[in-house]
Amino acid sequence: SNPSDPALSLSAEAMVDTGATYTVVPRSVADRLRLPITGKGRVRTATGEIQIDRGRAMVQINGLAEINPVFISDSVDKILIGVVTLETLALTVDPTTGELNEAELFFY
């Protein structure tokens, strides 16, 4: 959802990509949610390095929600959840099942 206007929200299926640092949303989703653009960022893709818009979105997974940085892509057609978002929400991926689980947190 839009972090400044929770009425601008949608539910969508997303793919968790543990090889991606940040979450990536298609331009069509960013436009629909009117996500604020906070700058540009360089990202490395399978086809090389590109510069794309960077923004912020409220991301909710399994009932856990936080504002996260996102990259806005003109070439990706589905939402890709990166490890920064997983860490922000304290989620881990079980490598044997592919399921998302709440991370065990430690403070020393």
Image (cartoon, rainbow, N blue to C red):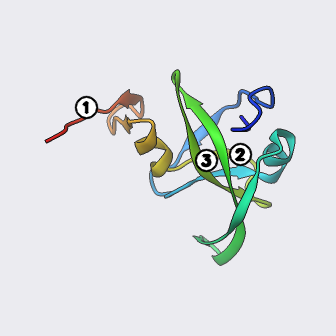
Picture quadrant where residue 29 is located: top right
Q: Secondary structure at mark 2?
A: loop
Q: Secondary structure at mark 3?
A: strand
Q: Is residue 57 above or below residue 70?
A: above
Question: Which circle, 1 or 3, is nearer the viewer?
Answer: 1
**48 or 57, which is in the foreground?**
57
Q: Secondary structure at mark 1?
A: loop
Picture quadrant where residue 10 is located: top right
Q: Is residue 71 above or below residue 32?
A: below
Q: Which is nearer the N-term, disc 1 or disc 2?
A: 2
| x 71%, y 45%: residue | 78
| x 63%, y 53%: residue | 70
Which residue lies under the disc numbered 3? Answer: 80
Q: Where is the N terminus found, in terms of image quarters?
A: top right
As shown in the figure, which amino acid type bears the numbered disc 2? Lys
Query: Mark 2 and mark 3 in contact (Cβ < 8 Å)?
Result: yes
